[in-house]
Image (cartoon, rainbow, N blue to C red):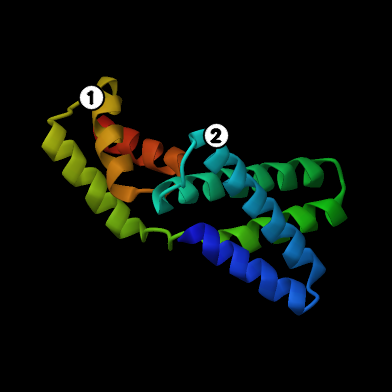
């Protein structure tokens, strides 16, 4: 399971005395354990991936805030944490593969205008399962539906 993989990586980082990596993995493990506790049962890998994606997104947003505030040191820490946590996420889809999935979802749903975005998004997001950013998918779907 993904939680076990994160825990093993954290132990390895601790033994190797990589403090920054250990800290990032502790954050991820804490988020996973909190989500497990809230769910009331062990998280499946899909649920764990969603938690880790949220953590990476939070780190990227914090990185940008720090950069805007002129705190390059803190921004670097956040970027490093996002990179460490991101190692446990599935590989992102290639743009061509994502475009193919969007085209298939549009054809299957029969959508023809941006008003039907929801029909297409539901199909695409189920197919990508965390391998693509929702904003990127949304923009691609809207572009396809406007044509």
Taking depth in this image into account, of 103 and 127 the one nearest to the observer is 127
Task: Tell me if residue 131 can be seen.
Answer: no
Is mark 2 in CB contact (under 8 Å) with mark 1?
no
* Quadrant into which the N terminus falls: bottom left
Residue 136 picture location, percent across and down: 43, 43
User: Residue at the spot x=44%, y=45% of the render?
Assistant: 47
Residue 44 picture location, percent across and down: 41, 50
Quadrant in the picture for residue 6: bottom right
Q: 19 above or below 114?
A: below
Task: Tell me if residue 5 can be seen.
Answer: yes
Q: 103 above or below 82?
A: above
Taking depth in this image into account, of 1 and 104 the one nearest to the observer is 1
Indicate the secondary structure of the residue bearing disc 2.
Answer: helix
Would you say 107 lies left or right of 124 here?
left
Indicate the secondary structure of the residue bearing disc 1.
Answer: loop
User: Residue at the spot x=15%, y=32% of the render?
Assistant: 109
What's the distance in space between the residues labelled 2 and 1, CA to CA?
A: 39 Å
**Residue at the front extreme of this rendering:** 40
User: Residue at the spot x=45%, y=47% of the render?
Assistant: 43
**Residue at the top extreme of this rendering:** 115
Identify the mark nearer the N-term, 2 or 1. 2
Residue 114 picture location, percent across and down: 28, 24
Residue at numbered disc 1: 113
Would you say 72 lies left or right of 36 here?
right
Q: Which label number is shown at residue 38? A: 2
Would you say 125 lies left or right of 15 here?
left
Quadrant in the picture for residue 81: bottom right
Q: 3 above or below 124?
A: below
Q: Residues within 10 Å of mark 1 (few under 14, many from 20)?
A: some
């Amino acid at each position: 399971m993904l939680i076990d993989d994160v825990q093993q990586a954290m132990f390895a980082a601790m033994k190797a005395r990589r403090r920054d990596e250990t800290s990032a993995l502790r954050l991820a493990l804490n988020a996973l354990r909190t989500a497990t506790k809230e769910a009331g049962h062990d998280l499946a890998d899909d649920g764990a991936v969603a938690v880790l994606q949220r953590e990476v997104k939070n780190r990227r947003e914090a990185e940008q805030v720090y950069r805007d505030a002129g705190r390059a040191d803190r921004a670097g820490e956040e970027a490093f944490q996002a990179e460490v946590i991101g190692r446990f996420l599935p590989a992102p889809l290639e743009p061509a593969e994502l475009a193919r999935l969007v085209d298939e979802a549009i054809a299957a749903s029969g959508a023809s205008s941006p008003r039907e975005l929801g029909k297409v998004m539901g199909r695409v997001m189920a197919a990508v399962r965390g391998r693509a950013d929702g904003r990127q998918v949304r923009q691609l779907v809207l572009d396809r539906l406007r044509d």
